[in-house]
Image (spheres, coloured by chain):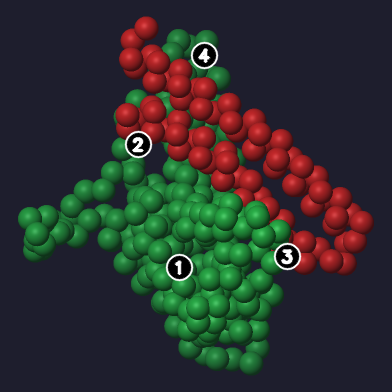
Chain colours: A red, B green
Amino acid sequence: MEGSALKLLGAGVAMIGSLGAGIGLGLIFSAWITAIARNPAAEGKFRQIGFIGFAVTELVLLMCFVIAVLLMFAV
Amino acid sequence: MASLLEEFEIHDLGAPLFSIGGHSIAFTNSALFMFLAIGSSTALMVLAMRPQAVIPGRWQMLAEKMYDFIAEMVESTAGEQSKPFFPFIFTIFTFILFCNLFGMLPRSLAVTSHILINVSIALSLFAIIIITGFIKHGLHFFHLFVPAGAPKFMLPFLVVIEFFSFAVRPFSLSIRLFANMLAGHILLGVFAGMTVTLLAAGWMLKPLGILPLGINIAITGFEFFVAFLQAYIYAILSAVYLRDALEMH
């Protein structure tokens, strides 16, 4: 196979990691919604911790994305 | 393929001003948008607060809301002692927010989609955090790397892990912002390219071009939300990391 084709293939393979991030984000938002549904009065307190959890989990996905973009455009 | 990244290119506006060590320094479009962001955010705050009315008008309401939003967040996240650091975090928030929003204008450059800018903000934040930690706690600050109540024989591993998790923070903070802006703008470019390709195809495919266009409009709205959200997350995480230096754990 040509080098450029392998690069594109590698970019696709790198994005498989986003599977885990997707599951993790789903878990975070489901827990967030459950928490708000159980105690709607404390919604403001959950907001910050929810966003922190979201940001930390999302980083996994973004790392995969950066690797994929590097493979496609920079390498 | 490379045209997708064309909007992120930095180019000189006008002739080089001076040179440092063989590198010519010129006024770039990145600098232009940073000046625009700083100028407009300062103008918003100064002009909106000019009336200082007891019953705020629309602009004063906006400025007060922004201030309250970050002030509440910093105090609840970083604790009572964080008061002196509030202006710094508020500046980071408004700067990143305005850079992100200026990036949404057509044919403009999203300054925060370059990791250089984000890393320099994050490193200055960490310089402040480390200096504050040493001033407040002295050499006791190194206890940050030693989890309380851990068994003795585990300590060598734990200290190494804690140290790396601390050292990686400025980079994870800046990569998050940079990758988010890059991903959003590339996504807009991909769907815009799809629309153009479908319009250039045969007459049967032409009407289908409306689908990616509709998706693009939705994504544009979402990008405005992301522009705000990422500035907020950057500010929250700055406050969280600041708490480590102020209160240890």
Residue at 70% x, 42% y is A25
Q: Amino acid at mark 1?
A: Phe
Say what secondary structure mark 4 lies in.
loop
Say what secondary structure mark 1 lies in.
helix
User: What chain letter is assigned to the residue under label 3?
Assistant: B
Label 4: how many Cα within 10 Å (few below 14, some 14–19, many 20+): few
> Viewer-nearest of labels 3 and 4?
3
Q: Does mark 2 fall on the same chain as mark 4? A: yes
Q: Is residue B249 left or right of residue B237?
A: right
Q: Amino acid at mark 2?
A: Leu
Q: Amino acid at mark 3?
A: Gly
How many marks are shown on the rendered structure?
4
Q: Earlier in the sequence, mark 4 or mark 2?
A: 2
> Viewer-nearest of labels 1 and 4?
1
User: What chain letter is assigned to the residue under label 4?
Assistant: B
Residue at 32% x, 67% y is B35
Say what secondary structure mark 2 lies in.
helix
Q: Is residue A18 left or right of residue B35?
A: right
> Viewer-nearest of labels 2 and 3?
3
